[in-house]
Amino acid sequence: MENTKAPMIQTVNVCKNFGSLEVLKNVSLTVEQGEVVCIIGPSGSGKSTYLRSLNHLEKITSGKIYIEGTLLDDREHGVNKVKLPKEEKNQLLLKMGMVFQRFHLFPHKTVLDNVTIAPINVKKIPKSQAEQIARDLIKRVGLSEKVDVYPSKLSGGQQQRVAIARALAMQPEIMLFDEPTSALDPELVGEVLAVMKQLAKDGMTMFVVTHEMSFAREVADKVVFMYEGEVAEIGTPTEIFDNPKHEKLKQFLNKID
């Protein structure tokens, strides 16, 4: 039965313009349930804009976005032809957890409070239950001893791990990561990637914009190379890294090697 599930995310011909600038050009992609998909490509190729458009941090100009088989967006000239009830739309958006480059933690709240605030306020989970879930997640990201600490006392890597726990506290069905290690000092990158690798092992569906090629090679089921707003090549890590076909992908990989 497993394989009859609708894809977690599917986009069809997604375009995004900022004025006359075309940032996304007919991006069609599918993320299956339980799949880890990494998006790579040079800066300015539309990777982050695409990820942000999935959970409505950016509004697409045209195209379709499906979440678990339900049509969330069907836009032309920026107007959405889908009229979902607000509650249903919010439920779809809550299926996606998001981790950003910057950690966006509340500085005046402890680690525990940062992780419980959304479940309590958005999902209306009782405080005691939210705290139990949060403690389990904080342990899962290796920060049990930092539960009562404020963000300013944490390293960047620790803050990002709290941000991952915070996103997981909403019990999403897919995690979106937008270059989660790019703001970190090199020696802190590994601790965040280790948490992400474990998530992937545990079966979490993940959509990751990343510059960490070794992570993409090791963890991804599918790697997407974006160039100038388009999907230029899709393949397994072996196909993308060992046998790239697109000239721009070859150049990109040569530069980073």
Image: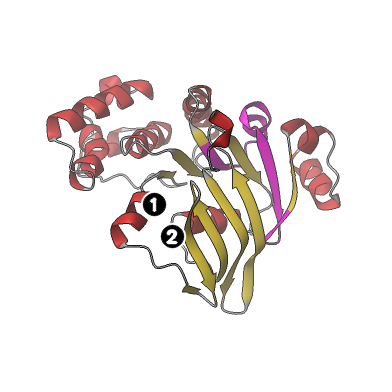
The residue under the point 62% across, 40% down is 38
Q: Is residue 254 magenta?
A: no
In contact (CB < 8 Å): disc 2 and disc 1:
yes
Q: What label sits on residue 110 in the rendered view?
A: none
Q: Is residue 58 above or below residue 139?
A: below
Q: Is residue 107 above or below residue 33?
A: below
Total residue callouts: 2
Mark closer to the chain start, 2 or 1:
2
Q: Amino acid at mark 1?
A: Leu
> In the figure, residue 142 lies in which quadrant?
top left
Q: Is residue 229 above or below residue 210?
A: below
Label 2 to label 1: alpha-carbon separation: 8 Å
Residue 193: image x %, image y %? 52, 29
Which mark is nearer the camera, 2 or 1? 1
Residue 100: image x %, image y %? 45, 47
Residue that numbered label 2 is attached to: 56
Residue that numbered label 1 is attached to: 93
| Disc 2 crowd, CA 10 A, few/some/many (<14, 14-19, 20+) | few
Q: Which residues are magenta?
A: 206-231
Q: Amino acid at mark 2?
A: His
With 57 as the anchor, is 223 left or right in this view?
A: right
